[in-house]
Image: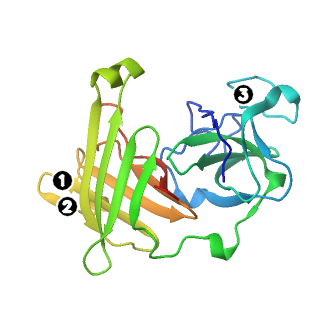
Amino acid sequence: MAATALIVLAAVTPAVAQGAESALCSRFGGGDFAAVALRQVTLGENLYFIKAEDEDTTCPANTENCLGKSYLVPGDQVLVMGMVNEFACTAFVDAKGAVTTGFLPKSRLEESPPDRLAAADDWEGTWKSEPLATLKLMPGKRGAYAILGDAVWASSKESMEQGSVNTGELRGEAAPVDGVISFAMSQNGQVEAAEAGEFDCAIWMRRLGPYLLVKDNLNCGGHNVTFSGVYRRKGK
């Protein structure tokens, strides 16, 4: 269960998730699913996020000036995307799809027990992620899932209110293979993701704990529209 008033601690580079030395912590925007791990907050006090280098050049560090405002409670599950010294770059998504990304001390994170891991067939539902991306997975034929998705990008809050937005959508049906659902949309219909053409929309999905990790090839909508990110099932 997450605390209220969560604040997104965003960065502009995926360096941490790729194991580089940069002290930034980026939102998951694609990359290798296998490089992301599920962990949970250990018993003890509430766990505050730690600021990144782009917020304070002395961070991340165990100092008062590096302490963020957002926090988690024991038992909350997070995705670990990389390490910087004794800090883990993590992502947390609440039940409304609000994403918080930031550093946490890795000493307060432990492996989630087996009963909190995602079941192999547990994909059904409506999944949400900021900013304004929704995926709906429904049982299809022969173990597949019918997938509907919509995403929106706006340059500002004012543009969003005026309806001046770029949009994207997904329509397809695919079954999990080795824990991953993937497909591509071409002018001639649905094809395998590996067979996507230069301008086709390709997408990959993986379940991990309460989360759905998604990455696309940036061809699934208008300018700056992407389905890539971390999602949580609506209402859970």
Residue sitting at x 66%, y 76% = 114
Residue sitting at x 59%, y 31% = 11
Residue sitting at x 44%, y 37% = 131
Tell me the quarter of the picture where residue 154 sits. Answer: top left
Residue picked out by circle 3: 53
Please name the amino acid that badge 3 sits on. Glu
The CA span between labels 2 and 3 is: 43 Å
The CA span between labels 3 and 1 is: 41 Å
Q: Is residue 141 above or below residue 47?
A: below
Please name the amino acid that badge 2 sits on. Gln
Please name the amino acid that badge 1 sits on. Ser
Q: Is residue 74 above or below residue 24?
A: below
Task: In the displayed orientation, state which residue is furthest to the bottom.
Answer: 142
Residue 177, percent from left and from top: 40, 73
Judge the density around disc 2: few (<14), some (14-19), many (≥20) Cα neighbours within 10 Å: some
Q: Which of the pair 79/100 is nearer the observer?
A: 100
Residue 94, percent from left and from top: 57, 49
On the rendered image, what quadrant is the N terminus found in?
bottom right
Q: Secondary structure at mark 2?
A: strand
